[in-house]
Image (tube, rainbow, N blue to C red):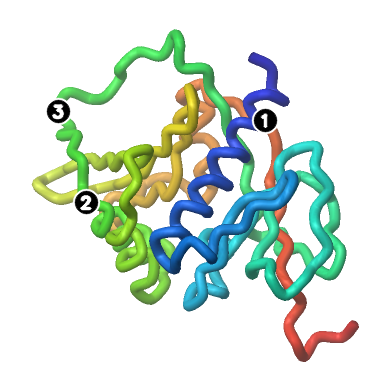
């Protein structure tokens, strides 16, 4: 599978996760689906680019800003009409074909399935925000979602959520508790060491502040 196909699948998974979170966190009317665009509006999370957002599928033209769109537009494009880029949070899309992957988990580490509320709360703590995703995650009811966690010294050290879309499995909302965090702020090497490869860069575009210069 080439990089462009992996990028398409990665972005599609992210968009569907955003739509699912909006569906259960707010309601069906919060889901956004337009040609080449998928995501959702999160109401109280309007300042979060990881919750109140849409994703532009590779090859589609980013939509110009309008009141129905959420806080953030994620895209591979270099500009979005009516938006300003937030380059500090640009995300590399990482892809890996799973056919030849072996189970390499340290047998001394306990693998569990934490609750969705625990996954959400761990993300809130890891990224230093008020309880936001924890309560929303606790309301998710979707069979495509699974949770994963590693326990060290009888404590949950890290969590992640996976989302099954067709024959793809997307990894989302990865968080490590501060007491166990030993990696650099840039998590890219963690994935490259596991043979993931970078297949694109998702750039975040948000509305300019109301008091900013035109």
Asked if residue 42 lies left or right of residue 75, the reply is left
Residue found farthest to the top: 100
Disc on res. 26? none
Q: Which type of secondary structure does the marked residue at label 3 adopt?
A: loop
> Residue 206, located in which quarter of the rendered image?
bottom right
**Residue drawn at the location 14% of the way across and 28% of the way down:** 108
Q: Is residue 64 left or right of residue 33?
A: right
Q: If the image is split into quadrants, where does the N terminus sit?
A: top right
* Residue at image coords 51%, 69%: 42
Mark 3 and mark 2: span between their CA atoms?
Answer: 22 Å
Q: Could you tell whether 109 is left or right of 188 in the image?
A: left
Q: Are circles 3 and 2 on residues that touch, CB within 8 Å?
A: no
Asked if residue 192 is positioned above or below residue 183 in the image, the reply reads: above
The numbered disc on residue 115 is 2
Q: CA distance from mark 1 to mark 3?
A: 33 Å
Mark 2, other Cα within 10 Å: few <14 / some 14–19 / many ≥20: some
Q: Nearer the viewer, mark 1 or mark 2?
A: 2
| Label 1 environment density (alpha carbons within 10 Å; few <14, some 14–19, many ≥20) | some
Disc 3: which residue: 108
Check residue 199 in the rendering and tell me which mark sits there, or answer none. 1
Q: Quadrant of residue 205?
A: bottom right
**Element at badge 2?**
loop
Q: Earlier in the sequence, mark 1 or mark 3?
A: 3
- Judging depth in this view, the residue of 180 and 81 nearest the camera is 81
The x, y position of residue 115, in whole percent, is 21, 51
Front residue of 186/68: it is: 68
The residue positioned 42% from the left and 38% from the top of the image is 163
Q: CA distance from mark 1 to mark 2?
A: 31 Å
Q: Position of residue 167 (x, y in %)?
A: 48, 22
Is residue 135 positioned above or below 1 on the image?
A: below
């Amino acid at each position: 599978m080439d990089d462009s196909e992996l990028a398409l699948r990665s972005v599609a998974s992210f968009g569907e996760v955003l739509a699912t979170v909006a569906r259960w966190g707010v309601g069906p009317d919060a889901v956004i689906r337009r040609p080449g665009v998928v995501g959702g509006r999160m109401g109280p999370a309007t300042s979060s680019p990881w919750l109140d957002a849409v994703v532009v599928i590779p090859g589609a033209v980013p939509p110009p800003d309008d009141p129905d769109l959420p806080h953030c537009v994620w895209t591979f494009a270099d500009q979005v009409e009516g938006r300003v880029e937030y380059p500090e949070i640009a995300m590399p899309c990482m892809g890996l074909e799973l056919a030849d992957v072996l189970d390499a988990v340290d047998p001394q580490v306990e693998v569990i399935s934490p609750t969705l509320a625990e996954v959400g709360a761990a993300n809130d703590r890891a990224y230093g925000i008020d309880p936001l995703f924890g309560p929303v995650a606790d309301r998710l009811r979707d069979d495509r979602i699974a949770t994963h966690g590693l326990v060290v010294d009888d404590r949950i050290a890290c969590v992640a959520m996976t989302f099954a879309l067709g024959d793809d499995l997307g990894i989302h909302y990865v968080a490590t508790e501060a007491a166990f965090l030993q990696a650099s702020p840039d998590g890219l090497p963690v994935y490259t060491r596991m043979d993931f490869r970078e297949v694109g860069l998702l750039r975040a575009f948000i509305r300019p502040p109301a008091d900013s210069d035109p």
